[in-house]
Amino acid sequence: MDLAFSSVTELAAMIAERKISAVEALDAHLAQVDRHNEAVNAVVILDRDGARERARQADAALARGDTVGPLHGVPFTLKDAHQTAAMRTTAGFPPFADYVPGSDGPVVGRLKAAGGVLVGKTNVAAMLGDWQSDNLLFGRTSNPWALDRTAGGSSGGAAAAVAAGMTPFDVGTDMQDSIRLPAAFCGVYGLKPTEHRVSLAGAFPDPSGTPRSVRLMSCVGPIARNLEDLALIYKIIAGPDGADTDLAPVPVDSMPKLELKSLRIAFASTFPGFPVAAEIGAAVERLAAGLASASACVEEAGLPKLDLHDDLAEGGKLIGMMLEAAQPEPPAEPTPVSSWFAALARRDRSILAWERFFESCDALLCPAAMTTAFAHCKPGSPLEVDSKDESYWMLPAYGAIFNYSGHPALAVPCGQDGNGLPIGLQLVGKRWSEARLLGIAAAIAALTGGFRRPPGY
């Protein structure tokens, strides 16, 4: 068995049954890092010695007969945004280059408590602010499928590392398609949960103890090569944690087993006025037709009567106001508090419109991004989509709509385009329906094809 491409659940079971050791599992992934990371540049902070000691401790615990958690001895990486005790957390930002938090964030703490062995951190866009993972500290991350292409961002290092077998899972952050877009580009699964489902405490470096201003639209979620792993990691990290008081006490359910004939799927190969590559739109339509042939109830979506371009603009305004509040000094003309509440009221209308939409379907099938992985470029450069230049800033539009509305959304690999690059589609569900959304993705996995190992890995 190739341990570098074994699933989280397979690794955990083999370690628990002492068929392999935690050290062996770690060494298999470190070998993959040694083999491929110089070209891909996905893992940018590596605690090789510390991880090996933690793996030895995991093996010793099993030898003593200790009770172990669901991730016992399983190696993993984290996006270089999560606060990690005794390990640098930089967000790709030079002023944070030497920042070592004094404690783990709640999500990190839960993964370690479940027995996971943290190996290192994966690359990001500087300050998580772009859809290519490139920064002055660590340079740029390339796509394992084509090194001249981006892995996406800002969780691009995470998606690339998972796709290349350097780690069985990672945990990203997503405020503007930042989990789903890289997952789609690299051919893996990525879940953006419902807003306020997973703790944001400790999800961004904070050397100066500044009050957390990003409290909306941003989410923390897992990236993995299969849905069972995604569901396992999601269930470990989701729910109230005593640190992020915005988290809702909604039960975190297990992924159900669903039959295709029980599903109601709406599909949209594009949104009004949103560009999309023809091959991605065609992939949506092919999958919808396949689902209909397999007895699912499928219909073309009658999308909410919203100005989706305005929703994107309003989401940008909210992000701008949150970032303004994080600045050490207020601007000369601060945004009035009344504008914040007006923006929230405007957002509420869109949230409710999407909630009404999901009363008549279990999930919406649509693109995850307007194109597949594109060639490395300067941020803001026009992107060629079907021989036409499109705005760089529309790249994450299909995902960012659901950051604005707060709904859970899942990137699902679905074949490749004519250049051999992964096509990722998006499944979206009603708020708090992550478990069912994962179950829907599992039910349709035979039609989507799932994760495929990049050539040469």
Image (cartoon, rainbow, N blue to C red):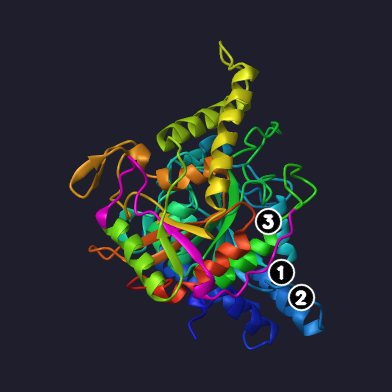
- Judge left or right: residue 76 versus residue 188: right
**24 relative to 373, above or below:** below
Q: Earlier in the sequence, mark 2 or mark 3?
A: 2
Q: Disc 3 residue type?
A: Val
Q: Which mark is residue 265?
A: none
The residue lying at 42 percent from left, 76 percent from top is 294
Residue 78 falls inside the magenta stretch: no
Q: Earlier in the sequence, mark 3 or mark 1?
A: 3
Q: Position of residue 323 (x, y in %)?
A: 57, 29
Q: Disc 2 residue type?
A: Val
In the foreground, 195 or 308: 308
Q: Position of residue 15 (x, y in %)?
A: 66, 82
Residue hosting label 3:
108
Residue hosting label 2:
68
Q: Quadrant of residue 234?
A: bottom right
Find out whether the residues at labels 1 and 2 contact each other: C-beta distance under 8 Å. Answer: yes
Residue 263 falls inside the magenta stretch: yes
Q: Position of residue 289 (x, y in %)?
A: 35, 68
Residue hosting label 1:
115
- Judge left or right: residue 51 versus residue 266: right
Q: Position of residue 291 (x, y in %)?
A: 41, 70
Task: Provide the residue span drawn in magenta.
Answer: 250-278
> How far is mark 1 from mark 2, CA to CA?
7 Å
Of all residues, the one furthest to the top in this rendering is 332
The residue lying at 44 percent from left, 58 percent from top is 266
The kind of secondary structure the magenta stretch mainly shows is loop
The secondary element bearing badge 1 is classed as: loop
Find out whether the residues at labels 3 and 1 contact each other: C-beta distance under 8 Å. Answer: no
In the foreground, 298 or 9: 298
Q: Dot 2: few (<14), some (14–19), or many (≥20) neighbours within 10 Å?
A: some
The secondary element bearing badge 3 is classed as: helix
> How far is mark 3 from mark 1, CA to CA?
11 Å
